[in-house]
Amino acid sequence: MSPRLVRTLLAALLLPGLWGGAGCAGGPRALMPTPTIFQEVEAAAAIFAAVPPARREPAQDLLFITNRAPATDGPLPYGERRSMSLAFGSAQVLMRPGLTWEALTQLSQSGERSPRVSLELGPVREVGRFPEEPYRLNMTPAGVVRDAAMLAAHRQARDDLRTEVRRRLQAAPSGKVILYVHGFNETLASAAYTAAELCHFFGRTHLCAFFTWPASSTGNLLTSFTQTTESAQFSVGHLRQTIRALAQIPEVEGIHLLAHSRGAALLLSALRELHIEAIAAGQAPAEAFKIEQVVLMSADIDAEVASQQILIFGSDPDMLTRWDRPVLPELFRGRLTVYTSPQDRALLVSRTLFRSGNRIGQLTPEQIRPSFIDLFDRFGRMDLVVYEGRRTDFFGHSSFTSNPRVSADLVELIRNGSAPDDPARNLISTGPISWGFPQEVR
């Protein structure tokens, strides 16, 4: 993109309310375009036939976990302010207008929908909340100890979360959790919509959850982006706590982690801390936290920063003081998949603001250092999937939902855990760790 266009974008985005659109309010939003796999009659029929009878209704009841403060006014129950306590509950996403399950499945297989399917936020109910931080400490003759009442309140909230997750798992045949982490310019409603539409096309067999943090969705670009960046840093500990709490529930068989935009930076930071925690205890992170697929979509994080987060112990052997095995610990059971697009205009703005060399979500194989490619290749199960076709949303920043071919690949990855060379994903190898889409489907 030319420098002139960058300046034009930056100038325009400084105007309040122009940046984003759908994420700025709690109003309805159209269901994402149909992934190409659902436009194949037999494949779609098989996926929808596997949906449990109890889940064959248009509305979806999602588990939300948030460190947004409750809103005192406005259309949504949680706003942009930060909360010093972690809450969880139920968020319903309705699919309008008044559809039956049969009508929804038919429309979900159509490339051109009539009528349009709209997502609308239904009732949101808080089920539990952890105590406000920092937890109280008491001085004793022996030293500082945790306050017994605070510990009891924490354990009660943890048990309430476990009860809620167990209840939901009874209707989730896979026994696995999908946890979606949103990015910049998102509200509780827009995050719920994305989680709901993804889980709908994943086949509704998982426990579907989303972590919503106090990203800014108001004001001009600079003030909003600055607030969001620091709120992401603020949220690292709460996301870490969320993943750990889910993993410690025996009935949870595995956790798929999906993150978009600035949420990818948040997720990598939380995973880094969890990896340190597990390795310090002599455990492999993959098993300690039951991490399955890790998917970064249009990741808004500097490429060099991300590489440091991902391979935290690769160049720091002194860190593995409690690891007595000759092989390095596994970070996840599945794959680390990074979806990128060089046409992503939102990341171009971010790159300009941060004076960043490359954002992960814009990378092409040619922009990755050969030493990094070699390292990732040797480590294994790390894939860069590059979409180089035309933009299917205004900024080209949401191809994982706006582009039917990209979303179909994501569906195959999450539903079946297919490697990128599996014919079902129909990708083309472009390097040791990189893959692209055939020209005819861009």
Image: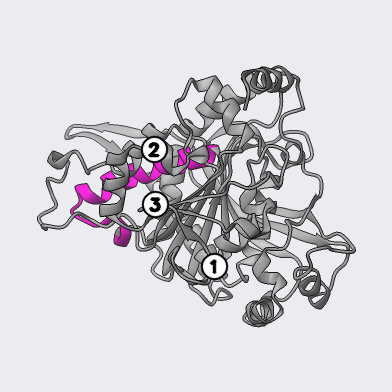
Front label number (1 vs 3): 3
For label 1, the residue is 412
The quadrant of the picture occupied by the N terminus is top right
Q: Position of residue 140 (x, y in %)?
A: 23, 33
Frontmost residue, 255 versus 352: 352
Frontmost residue, 268 versus 52: 268
For label 3, the residue is 431
434 horizontally vs 8: left or right = left
Q: Could you tell me which residue is drawn at 53 percent across and 71 percent down?
A: 424
The span from disc 1 to disc 3 (Cα, nearest Å) is: 21 Å
The mark that comes first in sequence, 2 or 1, is: 2
The quadrant of the picture occupied by the C terminus is bottom right
For label 2, the residue is 306
Residue 237 vertical position relative to residue 415 in the rendered view, above or below: above
The region drawn magenta spans 262-287
Categorize mark 1 by other alpha carbons within 10 Å: few (<14), some (14-19), many (20+).
Answer: some
Element type at marker 1?
helix
Name which residue type carries label 2: Ala
Frontmost residue, 131 versus 298: 298
Name which residue type carries label 3: Gly
Front label number (2 vs 3): 3
Reply yes or no: does residue 284 show up in magenta.
yes
359 horizontally vs 25: left or right = left
Q: Total number of numbered labels?
A: 3
The span from disc 2 to disc 3 (Cα, nearest Å) is: 20 Å
Q: Position of residue 431 (x, y in %)?
A: 39, 52
Frontmost residue, 293 versus 234: 293
The mark that comes first in sequence, 2 or 3, is: 2
The mark that comes first in sequence, 1 or 3, is: 1
* Residue 127 visible in rendering: no
Residue 311 vertical position relative to residue 117 in the rendered view, above or below: above
Element type at marker 3?
loop
